[in-house]
Amino acid sequence: MTTMELNLLTKDYITDQKVTVFTCSDGGVALTSTALKKGGLSTGDVGVQYKYKNTIVDVKVDTESNISTTFTFTGILPSTKTIASFKVPDYNSGKLEVHYFHDHANLTTAVAMNQTPAIDVSAAIGTPAIAFGAEAGYDTTLGSFTKYTAGISVTKPDSCASIILGDKGDSIKASYVHHFDQLKKSAAVAEITRRFSTNENTFTVGGLYAIDHLTVVKAKLNNHGRLGALLQHEVIPKSVLTISSEVDTKNLDKNPRFGLALALKP
């Protein structure tokens, strides 16, 4: 699925309360603080990012005393990016990724450094008009594939269509997004998913409309009666307020769910 389709059907549709504050110093240090209230549980984390030449270091600490560290290296080899990550106290969570980029192709290989090593490989090839992609995961201990997915997308100036075969061949997803103007201030998307093991079909339609350069509204509805809507407004430059809700139209006695998010970037 394309980035636009993901933005229309999934991004910013929240049912929790979330506040994010982002600051950046002249020395290249970025600090991000997040507080999240989900149901009756409140959590938070603090992340620090430091950039030095061709290296980026990210460290995040959450309220459960987990420390996540990521090192990103560029320029070690031409057209490549290397990412090493691990989490404390989960010492078996180490992961090494290598990304190779080309004008018409990219390849990513990831190895999980734990007691049951897993290897993930993904690749994409194509042009701005048409692209093919596939990914697979292999567990070296079990000697079997943990996942494999393949897809194709066709992109035009005002539309994009894609078909994805996923869940180890158990599901197929087809989607189409259309822009109604050159500035992409309004768009509509339709998606249908078929799961073969359960013979279940899910059909979703959604849309986006930019009221002005500061305010955007989005909505989506599927055949199971799930209706979602959100309003996003840039209250000050780079700081965004998002208000969203979800309603079960087939069970109106059930209370609707609401979400609120505020991202501040001074």
Image (cartoon, rainbow, N blue to C red):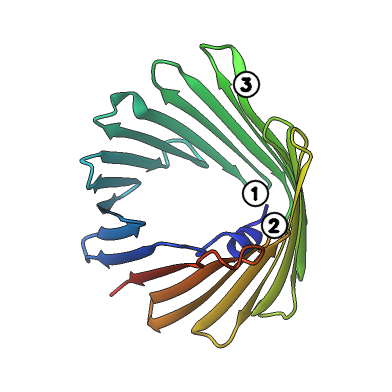
Front: mark 3 or 1? 3
Residue at the image position 44 percent from the left and 73 percent from the top = 242
Give amino acid for label 3.
Phe
Considering the numbered disc 2 on the image, is that residue within a helix, a strand or a loop? loop
Instruction: Measure how far apart labels 1 and 2 are at the Cα level.
Output: 41 Å
Residue at the image position 40 percent from the left and 76 percent from the top = 241
Q: Earlier in the sequence, mark 2 or mark 3?
A: 3
Image position, residue 195 (x, y; %)? 74, 40
Instruction: Measure how far apart labels 2 and 3 are at the Cα level.
Output: 32 Å
Give amino acid for label 1.
Asp
- Residue 160 in view: yes
Residue 103, disc:
1
Residue at the image position 62 percent from the left and 61 percent from the top = 9
Front: mark 2 or 3? 2
Using residue 211 as the reference point, say whether residue 23 is left or right of it.
left
Circle 3 is placed at which residue position?
145
Circle 2 is placed at which residue position?
224
Using residue 229 as the reference point, say whether residue 264 is left or right of it.
left
- Which residue is nearer to you in this view: 114 or 79? 114
Residue 254, placed above or below residue 54: below
- Disc tally is 3
